[in-house]
Image: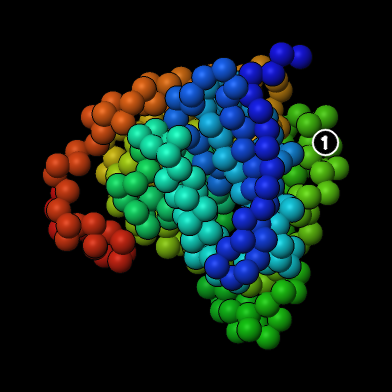
């Protein structure tokens, strides 16, 4: 097999002293077209589950970087225990920005790639620094709770009352996400056999953090301004396609694209038949290629000159903007 990329692994210590697993896929034959930073989904990991994404994008000329969140994959921490969603966002922001600052990557366009919960991470990274990222690819993003799936306020109130008493308990009822997310039976079983993927019930505090984050992101969809491609399978029962439609409709981005795939499920890049996966990756790479030629090309998509400092401060603080 003629590899067009190299793969490397490492560890990075966050501000809380935890060792987080990191990895990267780099094109061999030329300088990367742009940088792509992976934000994986809930319970997932980068080295194996996101491997095909890294390989395909690196083979297409992109430098791809991944990190397992605290408690996920090969990183330190209690398995799939999220005490504060802000910790996930801040870890990604600090580590990924440190890569962007390396001399060899100066001037390269910087894209976020978020799947499911990673879509929320990507949007919050954008909110944290609205002008830093040059675009995002969002695959079945967790950016709004579907009205069909919103838990009853009484149920949420009961769980909130228990949050500080039994935060790590795996007591939140949930369906088998792997069965619901990945259509292809063989791929589904491969994913199920990946012991780095968390497959138990969500912990109480983690579930509440995900709920709060989704509700928070939902209220600020109109504040999204970066170029983005959002992709969703029309038969997705894990995150409702209406979520992606809401993002597309409400976002203030000048450059935004929505791709809906009839008959496809949640795992667009990992759980579909090969021909469907190739179609999705073709759309992703085509979108990136059109926006990765140079920093000047990227900036031509953004009305940067119309931003006011007060707008950015309001955006970061979560207040509505008066004008653009």
In the rendered image, the quadrant that contains the N terminus is top right
Q: Is residue 90 above or below residue 245?
A: below
Q: Which residue is mark 1?
A: 190
Q: Is residue 110 above or below residue 275?
A: below
Q: Nearer the viewer, residue 127 or 234?
A: 127
* Crowd around label 1: few <14 · some 14–19 · many ≥20 (10 Å): few
Image side of residue 61 versus residue 299, left or right? right
Q: Secondary structure at mark 1?
A: helix
Give the colouring mode of the picture: rainbow
Image side of residue 100 versus residue 204, left or right? left
| Image position, residue 28 (x, y; %) | 60, 22
Quarter residue 303 falls in: top left
Residue at the extreme front? 103
- Residue at 57%, 40% in the rendered image: 65
| Image position, residue 292 (x, y; %) | 39, 26
Q: Total label count?
A: 1
Q: Is residue 72 above or below residue 100?
A: below
- Residue at 42%, 45% in the rendered image: 101
Quarter residue 12 falls in: bottom right
Image side of residue 185 versus residue 263, left or right? right
- Residue at 63%, 80% in the rendered image: 163
Q: Nearer the viewer, residue 182 or 25?
A: 25
| Image position, residue 245 (x, y; %) | 42, 40
Q: Nearer the viewer, residue 16 or 286?
A: 16
Observer able to see residue 191: yes
| Image position, residue 191 (x, y; %) | 79, 40
- Residue at 47%, 50% in the rendered image: 98
Observer able to see residue 262: no
């Amino acid at each position: 097999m003629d590899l067009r990329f190299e793969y490397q692994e490492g560890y990075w210590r966050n501000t809380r002293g935890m060792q987080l697993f990191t990895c990267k896929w780099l094109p061999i034959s030329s300088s990367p077209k742009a940088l792509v930073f992976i934000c994986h989904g809930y319970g997932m990991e980068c080295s194996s589950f996101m491997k095909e994404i890294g390989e395909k994008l690196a083979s297409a000329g992109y430098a791809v970087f991944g990190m397992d969140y605290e408690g996920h994959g090969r990183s330190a921490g209690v398995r799939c225990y999220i005490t504060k969603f802000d910790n996930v966002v801040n870890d990604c922001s600090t580590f990924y920005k440190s890569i962007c600052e390396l001399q060899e990557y100066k001037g390269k366009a910087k894209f976020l790639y978020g799947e499911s919960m990673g879509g929320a991470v990507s949007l919050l990274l954008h909110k944290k620094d609205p002008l830093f990222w040059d675009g995002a690819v969002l695959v079945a993003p967790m950016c709004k709770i579907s009205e069909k799936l919103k838990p009853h306020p009484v149920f949420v109130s009961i769980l909130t009352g228990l949050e500080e008493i039994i935060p790590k308990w795996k007591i939140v009822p949930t369906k088998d996400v792997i069965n619901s997310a990945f259509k292809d039976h063989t791929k589904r079983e491969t994913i199920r056999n990946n012991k780095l993927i968390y497959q138990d019930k969500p912990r109480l505090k983690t579930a509440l953090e995900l709920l709060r984050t989704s509700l928070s992101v939902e209220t600020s969809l109109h504040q999204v301004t970066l170029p983005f491609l959002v992709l969703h399978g029309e038969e997705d029962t894990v995150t409702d396609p209406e979520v992606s439609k809401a993002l597309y409709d409400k976002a203030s981005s000048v450059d935004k694209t929505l791709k809906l795939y009839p008959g496809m499920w949640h795992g667009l890049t990992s759980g579909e038949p090969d021909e469907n996966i190739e179609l999705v990756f073709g759309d992703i790479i085509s979108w990136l290629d059109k926006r990765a030629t140079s920093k000047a090309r990227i900036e031509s998509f953004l009305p940067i000159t119309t931003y006011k400092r007060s707008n950015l401060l309001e955006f970061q603080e979560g207040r509505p903007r008066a004008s653009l």
